[in-house]
């Protein structure tokens, strides 16, 4: 099985770390004071000078070594280890990375709660108006 990028393709590693940080090329470019096109060029480059790499690492909030040693496999292992630690911790509702509740049910429940709160607020306003009308009629 061949890969499209070489294992030490530094630009691709930067791209993957940026994506994992949920950062767009524009945001990284702005942080570095360069254009989005320059970021694109960097991410397509196999090698990058150390000074530039150091700036990029700082902007991404990682070390230069983290970029150099990054691999998708290592990232997957990291997240699997993290998820296993969460599953084994006191968070009893998380097992095997599966929710124990239906998110849609929670959303409907939330809407129902909001509806009840709105109805109570509306009733309170009606009661207030009724009370104020009584006060006006007494004068």
Image (cartoon, rainbow, N blue to C red):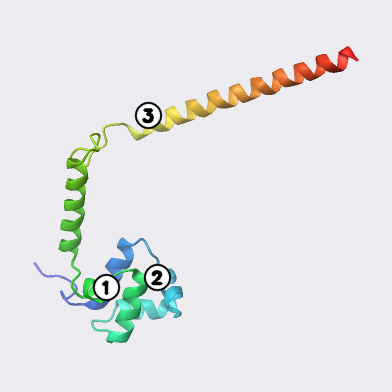
Is residue 14 positioned above or below 133 on the image? Answer: below
Q: Are marks 1 and 2 in contact (CB under 8 Å)?
A: no
Are there few (<14), some (14-19), or many (20+) residues within 10 Å of tag 3? few
Screen quadrant of the N terminus: bottom left
- Residue 115 placement: quadrant: top right
Where residue 63 appears, as percent x and y from the top left, is 27, 73
Q: Are marks 1 and 3 in contact (CB under 8 Å)?
A: no
Is residue 91 positioned above or below 115 on the image? Answer: below
Q: Secondary structure at mark 3?
A: helix
- Residue 132 placement: quadrant: top right
Are there few (<14), some (14-19), or many (20+) residues within 10 Å of tag 2? some
Are there few (<14), some (14-19), or many (20+) residues within 10 Å of tag 1? some
Query: Which residue lies at the image location 35% right of the left edge and 35% below the top edge?
Result: 103
Q: Earlier in the sequence, mark 1 or mark 2?
A: 2
The residue pinned by badge 2 equals: 25
Where residue 39 appears, as percent x and y from the top left, is 37, 77
Q: Viewed as shown, does residue 96 lie left or right of 43?
A: left
Give the number of the disc on residue 10. Answer: none
Screen quadrant of the C terminus: top right
Where residue 15 appears, as percent x and y from the top left, is 30, 70
Where residue 34 appears, as percent x and y from the top left, is 44, 80
Query: Which residue lies at the image location 42% right of the left edge and 33% below the top edge?
Result: 107
Q: Nearer the viewer, residue 56 or 7?
A: 56
Of all residues, the one furthest to the left in this rendering is 1
User: From mark 1 to mark 2, how far is it between C-alphas?
Assistant: 19 Å
Q: Secondary structure at mark 1?
A: loop
Give the number of the disc on residue 105. Answer: 3
The residue pinned by badge 1 equals: 63
Q: Nearer the viewer, residue 120 or 19?
A: 120
Query: Which residue lies at the image location 60% right of the left edge and 22% below the top edge?
Result: 120
């Amino acid at each position: 099985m061949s890969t499209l990028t070489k294992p030490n393709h530094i630009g691709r590693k930067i791209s993957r770390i940026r994506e994992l940080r949920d950062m767009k090329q524009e945001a990284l470019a702005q942080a570095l004071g360069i254009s989005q096109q320059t970021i694109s060029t960097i991410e397509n480059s196999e090698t990058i000078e150390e000074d530039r790499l150091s700036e990029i690492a700082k902007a991404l909030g990682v070390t230069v070594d983290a970029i150099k040693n990054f691999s998708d496999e290592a990232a997957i292992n990291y997240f699997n280890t993290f998820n296993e630690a969460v599953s084994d911790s006191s968070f009893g509702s998380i097992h095997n990375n599966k929710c124990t509740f239906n998110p849609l049910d929670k959303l409907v429940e939330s809407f129902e709660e909001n509806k009840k709160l709105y109805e109570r607020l509306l009733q309170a306003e009606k009661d207030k108006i009724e009370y104020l009308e009584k006060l006006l009629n007494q004068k």
